[in-house]
Amino acid sequence: MKIENIQVLRGPNIWSTNRKKLIQMRLNLEEMEHKPTNKIEGFIERLEKMMPTLYQHRCSPGVPGGFFQRVVAGTWMGHVVEHIALEIQTLAGMDTGFGRTRETKTVGIYNVVFTYLEEKVGIYAAEAAVRITEALIKGEDYNLEYDIQQMREIRENTRLGPSTGSIVEEAIARNIPWIRLNKESLVQLGYGKNQVRFRATMTEKTSCIAVDIASNKDETKRLLEEQAIPVAKGITISSVAGVDEAIRKVGFPLVFKPLDGNHGRGISINIRDKEAAIAAYEHAAKISRKVIVERFITGYDFRVLVIDNKMVAAALRDPAHVMGDGHSTIQELIDLENTNPKRGYGHENVLTLISVDRDTLDLLDKKGYTLETVPAKGEKLFVKSTANLSTGGTSVDVTDHVHPQNVFICERISKIIGLDICGIDIMAQNLSEPLNDTGGVILEVNAAPGFRMHIAPSEGLPRNVAGHVIDMLYPPGKSAARIPIIAITGTNGKTTTTRLIAHIVKNNGHRVGFTTSDGIYVQNNMMLKGDTTGPVSAEFILKDPTVDFAVLETARGGILRAGLGFSQCDIGVITNIQEDHLGLADIHTLEDLARVKSVVTNSVKKDGWAVLNADNDYCVRIGKKADCNVAYFSMDENNPVIKSHCKKGGIACISENGFVTIQKGDWKIRVQRTIMIPLTFGGTVPFMIQNVLAATLASFLWGFKTEDIQTSLQTFIPSAAQTPGRMNIFEFKDFRFMIDFAHNPDGFIGIKAFLSHIDSPLKIGIIAGTGDRRDSDIREIGKLSAEMFDYVILRQEKHLRGRTEQNILDLLIEGIHSVDPNKQFEVVPKEIEAIKYAMSMAKPGAFIVALSDVVDNAIETVQNYQEQERNGLFNA
């Protein structure tokens, strides 16, 4: 078998709008296409032996063992790969469940699709599943545990930490979108101007000064002590010579800890002699130049979490330990404890595996033990000096047992230090009595405290502390986390419709960001140039903190490649579904293409709107399945779909009696005369009228007033600046020159209809084919060119896409000759030369049309000639 391609889908996609995180692997079964599982001797036995947990996969029979039934009956290897990819992720601690395997139009090639939790793990699982399946086919041994451990390690290296992850999960539960801004823990919640950012458990509300204070343990202690907060007695030293001073001033037993350390690194406790004190200082000095030396206070280690100056959780922390049984060594006891199902690699379970390190060996050495020592039965032996969960410690929730006086102290500490989220470490006999009564002290105040001990304690009630973070970032009364999104897709008209909607939105006082096939714009300022109609470009706009309204052109390529760049939109527009790009990426029919385009309308929120073309059968079919409000637009007020829809009280936008009109039920609102809308070229371009109808309807549904829409329609002028490559007409002394992006038969038909209104003695066309279109599409372009132009210039320097230049030209010529074997044409390969040649043969009144796939070059060339003519330097 051969993996031809692996795609990572991150947003709503053709397989599912709810399951956004999918791996899509294009798998060529090669000779295995003719060998289903029941034709391979011993396959089911080897599969059951290697992965008995696959019994839980119900598959199509819908019962436990259902997948194994399919294997016995005979299924194809792509299906097996899918289930193995899902199961090995589950075995590695990432429970996934959705999968699909579908044969493509190419025999033997399948799309294997399955969910993932971590992107890189999903890719690894796809590749590993194929290796495992091949080993099962051949009857070879396979080290499955190696793959599982590799996936665990990849997950720990790439996943969000448990604290960051908990905030993201809470945001998702509240329907707040999120974007990971780097490979670490920097996360954006919300879109555009409504976004907030956080990193781990520090938010954009976290004071930089407060973090600086908390990172300096000496400064923190001083501030707390000045405010009568009980703290541990101690001093700060910065050399071995300072150890003697610390012993003298503080007295044994001692604790040594780095001034600016975290996660328990470099800490040594219960130091009782000078030699151990020097070693403890040197250990801490590896982390920080300055070292805090404090009196070692006996008691229990508590962590109190305060968010937005309110105590929300408290936990009793216990360092990693083992209990002696009288016959096992310490190493054996650690190994036994690590088999506890609550423990896992990294953060995969409630508890972390216990590792043996210098801290462990030092603690054992102080007791005169080694790893081979056999502790007495019932002896509790600590193997870590600090209670951090990341080193194997445990936690018990005590939130409901904290005395009100201690709550007051902790909330006051958060204000003294100035942290919006802080973790307060306390050493005391308990928290159910006031610290002043028990002699308890504050050990540290931590910025960016971990949430794991609170959200998943080893004992006690889990606390949804992430909910308090979201409440702080999006308090009641604050505007929603999202910004309005209108997404536009379709075969033709997407860019013009997008630009027109953005123009209307901007004129209504919004700061609009929009993406098109020629660039990314914020308030008409181009941010990036190029075809920016995919998910990355959508995210660009949604990350911009100045944008309060997004209008996003959404092309098929991006949907197929990675899914949508947003989780849901308010309005989804489909302009039309016509033949284009067929035969690419397993999209062979208009039904296939409609499935791709419908991803946009499927992502519309339930109370949002799908805006669809009633004159297009495929759009109408999509409307019947839409799980949101539906509105239609049409060039024909008597369109049966429109009449039926409006009879039921539906909303539509129609072209009637020379007006662009909104219709709801029986009443109509005439927005503007078509001939008064510059984009329609005096009402002579039907496909431009369709674009106006779509944009008008979407704007009306959002809530813009018809008079404001009318003004915007009147001020949107088709030009190289406002609609580059969309019927841009340039006036010369003796002729006119039009540039348009039409690149498929439907686009050519639209241009042909427009030219029928043009009175010219000579219509010259400059055309080119695109190599990744079907032969029939390229011939059709040639045919339509012969029908609408008196003279055709063929150019073909770009977009060969797997074909030869001559092959494309031959197909175009075949199309031309199918109309008129004597039609005049010329081959001028380079576009700039073709433009110059067309101008040279133009007679007074000529109309030249360049249907260009690279509009920027053509526009710049023609504008240069215009400038030369104005300066008397150009003579065609």
Image (tube, helix red, strand yellow):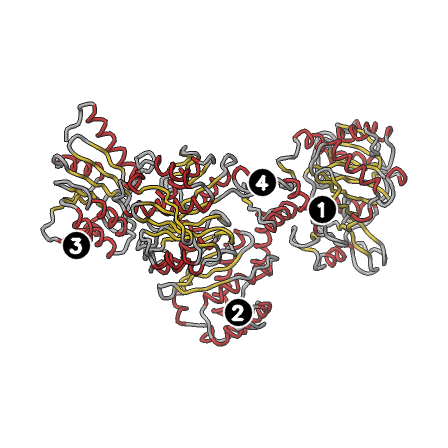
Point out the tag, 2 or 4, that comes first from the N-terminus.
Answer: 2
Q: Secondary structure at mark 1?
A: loop
Point out the tag, 2 or 3, that comes first from the N-terminus.
Answer: 2
**Which numbered dot is residue 357?**
1
Q: Residue at x 21, y 54 (%)?
A: 779
Q: Nearer the viewer, residue 180 or 817?
A: 817
Name the residue beneath numbered marker 3.
814
- Asked if marks 4 and 1 touch (Cβ < 8 Å), the reply is no
Q: Secondary structure at mark 4?
A: loop
Give amino acid for label 3.
Glu
Q: Residue at x 26, y 52 (%)?
A: 745
Q: Nearer the viewer, residue 586 or 239?
A: 586
Name the residue beneath numbered marker 4.
479
Q: Nearer the viewer, residue 547 or 669?
A: 669
Q: Quadrant of residue 108?
A: bottom left
Q: Tell me residue 254's x, y (percent).
A: 83, 36
